[in-house]
Image (cartoon, helix red, strand yellow):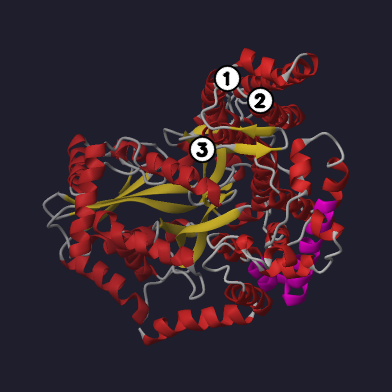
Amino acid sequence: MSAAKTQTPNRVVATMRRIPATLAMVALILAAGVIGQGLWRPFEDSGMYDVVAYGLPAFADGRWWTPVTGTFFVNQPWVYLFTIAGFAGMAYLEFRRGSLVALAYYWVGQLFAIFATALVLWPLSQLPWAWAETQAQALDVGASGGTMACIAAAVGLFVPPWRVRAWLVLLGFVFIAMIFWGTLADLEHLMAVLLVLFVDRSLRIQRTTVREQRLLAFIAVLVIGATQVVSILVPTDGPFGPTEPVSGGFVDFAIDTVVILLIANGLRRGRRWAWVLGVILGVFNVLTAALIVVGIVVTSEAQVESVIDGETELAIASGILWLLMLGYLIWVRRAFRARRTSTIGGQPAPSVDDVKAMLRADGGGTLSWMTTWDGNSYARTTHGIVAYQRRAGVALALADPLGPAATRAASVDEFVRMAEHAGLVPCFFSADENTRAAVPSTWRSLVVADDTIVDLPGLQFTGKQWNSVRSSLNRAGREEMTFRMTRLADEPWGVRQQLRAISEMWVGDKGLPEMGFTLGTLVEAEAPEVRLALAIAPNGDVDGFLSWLPVFGGDGSIRGWTLDLMRRREGGFGPVMEFLIGSSAKLFSEEGAEIMSLSGAPLAHDYPPDAGMIATLSDKLAEILEPVYGFGSLHRFKQKFHPRYETMYLLYRDESDLTRIGGALTRAFLPDATLRQFAGAGLELARGERD
């Protein structure tokens, strides 16, 4: 405990040592707040304000020192919260790139924002434009120009695709604040962000994927909808003139808001109908704004407002936003071709027989036979087949693509593109290292299990390490237990009924139905390619059984077997599982098989010490699920056979997909579970926690 307590303070101290420039700036601002008393009273009301504040009037009067002095003061006490929080971007930038770089971005951004704003307002104030005239006479203090520049520079350091998303949020914030409120500070923020955008060139929308193009449209439409709601409730005073809350125009904005909510999710999923509605809504708003401008020029603003029953400023601002949105929708129109019934893969779609034929011809991994089970769909690629399930808007690919090993990368790329064009979230579950290497470099991976593989050539249960297995085999001999490798269809009716009774008893103890997806049932064991290992007691009862799935090696050969079902009779032969697995291993080795996979126990991976948060979350989830499914116990049991481990991964685009993938996996593993069964399992989890 003492080590845990000291670790966090040490980490905080180490972080603070890496951001001295940021801490110094914050300290200077707080010190200025004490000197100028701005921490507890409005500084803009003090006599010092005109001396230190910057703006066009200050430059006209020759107060050129104000861009520096005004940086350290804040106009209102409550603004200190936002000012100090704004330095988070500088802290991140300094932590990543050093103090000199952070200070350079801050001061260049701050000074550029101040002088560029004055330079823009100077000619605009000569026009009959009330907003420009007002802002040209205003003064300002604060560090926000520099902090916004640092935030923009920090965004440029984000990894894709978060960089583009963060840029969109930042640009949306500064542009919308400028259009609807347009204070001197808003113009300074815009100038600082545009400077970094131009200098860093870290925003490259043209390189985004189809998924990102849809997500950008989704976010942009929601932002437009939110601004329309806010602007109808909050007073604004932007470049297009002031508005009052609840000032009319409810019909237009209500229609826009309802339609936006309807089409936003459709745009995210790439639906064609949503794109069409978005274009129609954009054209409507742009034409409305254009007609209002024409009406103001021809008649007067008051007459136009009486006709539209609303304020022209909001309609014009909304029209400008929709013009930008309309241009973007037309630019990325190819990203919106998905239909609700979109199919994935080349046609005709593969059948289960096609999958089996490809497995025999090209081989597969230890989980590849599971792709033949009911519930899977198949996407045909140029050289292979990808088995997947369509759940909750996710294309959940099972294991690795089938087909020649040399074409795996191409199959992965085709499947990802086809799933995205169909408006689905692509991911691979229980994929191996080769598939992990084949996905795009920006994808993430999460360990979901360790495949436990026993190499069979030369296998001998000799030596101290095999004591427990050897003892189980010897005890089985003493108690006259019989081992039989068979197939379900070859067994008499009485044996099949015993197997079903054992399975039903096992399921009944769990409170949830048998899991699917990568965990089979007796239905999957009926396939003629699947073998059963039976432990028969002297009285003829089945005390336990295993099912073994074939692992094809190509050219029709079987190079190994994968363990699926493990069931035992309550009160039967104690070490029945050790007996069955050990006997199966001996038989497979004698038959010339290369490997025996004991399959992977979900949430039971042995993480390295530096694995971090993922390991912590996985271990906690495994702990609370242990009373229901015993994944950890199963993993420890398999260690008796001294396997080697091959990691299985969940491969996904980025963290924003994990919530939907989690829901898809829940329905894939438990497609028939009811809410009542989930509640019952929750009580079992609670009892397990208390125990």
- The answer for how far apart the CA atoms under marks 1 and 3 are is 36 Å
The number of numbered badges drawn on the structure is 3
Say which quadrant the C terminus sits in: bottom left
Element under disc 2: helix
Amino acid marked by disc 3: Val
Mark 1 highlights which residue? 252
Kindly identify the residue that appears in the image at 59 percent across and 42 percent down: 402
What is the crowding at mark 3: few (fewer than 14 residues within 10 Å), some, or many (at least 20)?
many
Q: Which of 538 and 451 is in front in this view?
A: 451
Element under disc 3: strand
Q: Where is residue 134 in the image (x, y as percent from the top left)?
A: 74, 44
Camera sees residue 275? yes
- The answer for how far apart the CA atoms under marks 2 and 1 are is 9 Å
Q: Is-magenta flag for residue 264?
A: no
Mark 3 highlights which residue? 394
- The answer for how far apart the CA atoms under marks 2 and 3 are is 39 Å
What is the crowding at mark 2: few (fewer than 14 residues within 10 Å), some, or many (at least 20)?
many
The span picked out in magenta is 90-118
**Depicted 566 relative to depicted 503: above or below:** below
Label 1 or label 3, whichever comes before in sequence order? 1
CB-based contact (under 8 Å), mark 2 and mark 1: yes
Q: Position of residue 636 (x, y in %)?
A: 34, 68
Residue extending farthest bottom? 2
**Comparing marks 2 and 3, which lies closer to the viewer?**
2
Label 2 or label 3, whichever comes before in sequence order? 2
Q: Which of 51 and 412 is in front in this view?
A: 51
Mark 2 highlights which residue? 315
- The quadrant in which residue 26 appears is bottom right
Q: Is-magenta flag for residue 107?
A: yes
